[in-house]
Amino acid sequence: MTSQSHDTGWRRPEDSAAPAAGRPATASLVDPEDDLPSATYAGDFETTTIPHYDSGSAQASGPGFGPIGSSQPLPYVQPPESGRHAMFMPPGMDAEEDDPRIRAAGRRGTQDLGQLVLRAGLGAVLIAHGLQKLFGWWGGQGLAGFKDSLSDVGYQHADILTYVAAGGEILAGVLLVLGLFTPLAAAGALAYLINGLLAGLSGHDPRSFPYFLPHGHEYEITLIVAAAAVILIGPGRYGFDAGRGWARRPFIGSFGALLVGIGGGVAVWILLNGANPLS
């Protein structure tokens, strides 16, 4: 049994014109932020996993790439979220120090920070308004005043809806701040905000649409846009959803959550109020 040095068995792909013996010709380092999903990508609900190596592909025999007495090559795997290749690396080799492509693989600049600011800012606003309604803090109307306002607009079952609306607003805000179940939390916030906009429109002349404050609806519309943006772009990596598909590549599930939020807000208005907000 013979052994070979690490210098012989491990080389970068660009160091030689032809593929090294025992390594598939199509093997390449994969950027996890590539817009094209992998063949095994499971969509918005995918968790971070290492894809299986295709052992059925053509292989050339050669030493230095596999375990002792085997010509099986070591697999190239997609880098994990941290951007490092800790597994399947020979001793003493640091992927981040040896290949600039891997160093840049897990970096997205300030994108994740921006997603955190947007998500947590929207959540904080929802929490503050929910506490105003529930406990009357910061000059809020409290449960009694909130119930009266719902009854004045024309909502049925205002006594139950008071607790559901205030508690749901706080819960959605907390989940958004934590980055937990973000699509569902943002969809609930979107439904609540759309319902509030419809309630506000019902008190105005249907021939006009007041937008600017103090009597317009620019505040509600801004929050609606923020909630829709959180649904579409995902929570980012700074949250409890960081390992989920909707945090890394939100797509189909985000459109579904957006439709649920819009439809939920309109449905609650129709079922519990029934009035045309534009009439």
Image (cartoon, rainbow, N blue to C red):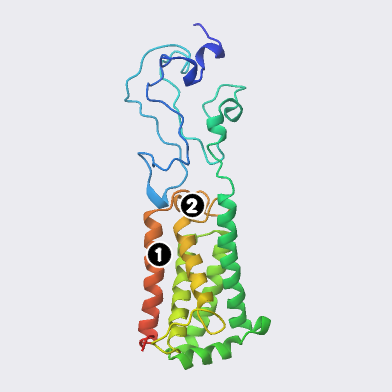
- The residue under label 2 is which amino acid type? Ala
Helix, strand or loop under label 1 = helix
Alpha-carbon distance for marks 1 and 2? 15 Å
- The residue under label 1 is which amino acid type? Leu
Question: Pointer 1: what residue?
Answer: 258
Residue at figure coordinates x 41%, y 69% from the top left: 261
Residue at figure coordinates x 47%, y 18% from the top left: 67
Q: Quadrant of the C terminus?
A: bottom left
Q: Nearer the viewer, residue 269 or 206?
A: 206
Measured as percent of width and height from the top left, residue 144 is found at 57, 91
**Residue 85 appears anywhere in the view:** no
Question: Pointer 2: what residue?
Answer: 247
**Relative vertical location of residue 218 with respect to residue 205 in this rendering, above or below:** above
Measured as percent of width and height from the top left, residue 81 is found at 53, 41
**Residue 224 appears anywhere in the view:** yes
**Relative vertical location of residue 233 with respect to residue 261 in this rendering, above or below:** above
Mark 2 crowdedness (10 Å alpha carbons): few <14, some 14-19, many ≥20: many
